[in-house]
Amino acid sequence: MIKQRKEKKINPFLPVMGLVMAVCMGAIAYFLAPEVIKLLRDSGIMTPGEFNARFDIQSDEEIIGSTIHYAFAVLLWFIVFGTTMTLFALAIGEDPNKEMELVQPRDGNIKKLKKYARALEKQQKKRAKQIREKQLRDARAAKKK
């Protein structure tokens, strides 16, 4: 079950932190790419001679700055960044106001309109219940003080 995200003020520097994190992950991927290439070459999938001929590499020093280096760096960046963003999304949780965004059907389908009306009514009841519960909590907290 996906946990609900608590309502908090969003930090205005959050997009900047995300950009800095993406750049840092790019730098890590850039420096790890030659090692991954060497690991793949020595893994036994292809002989080192076939690997070097296929990617036009003569020695380990030629890996750095070559097209294969940049390609593997971009591939590693996508893998690392995608995994990190997925973990962040799971940790943050689901937006509690997401269900408030019902879209009314535009076509004249009566079944869809009835379904929309039921969902809207259910949503309004749920929201009213949430407001009542919050007011009760606030009243109890005020009594304790």
Image: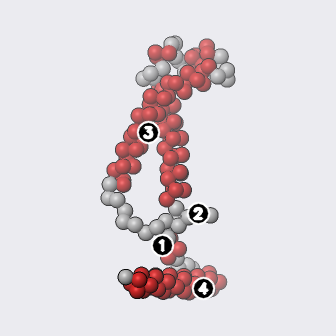
Separation of marks 4 and 3 at Cα, in angstroms:
47 Å
Give coordinates of residue 22: x percent, y percent: 41, 43
Separation of marks 2 and 4 at Cα, in angstroms:
24 Å
Q: Which disc, if any, is residue 118? A: 4
Give coordinates of residue 96: x percent, y percent: 50, 70
Secondary structure of the residue carrying tag 3 is helix
Ranked by sequence position, the earlier of labels 1 and 3 is 3
| Amino acid type, callout 4 | Arg
How packed is label 3: few (under 14 Cα within 10 Å), some, or many (20 or more)? some
How packed is label 4: few (under 14 Cα within 10 Å), some, or many (20 or more)? few
Q: Residue at x 52, y 62 (%)?
A: 93
Reading the image, the residue beneath label 2 is 2
In this view, which residue lies farthest toward the right? 45
Q: In this view, does 27 lie above or below 120?
A: above
Separation of marks 1 and 4 at Cα, in angstroms:
18 Å
Ranked by sequence position, the earlier of labels 1 and 2 is 2
Q: Which residue is drawn at 65% across and 83% down?
A: 111
Q: Which residue is drawn at 53% across and 18% down?
A: 56
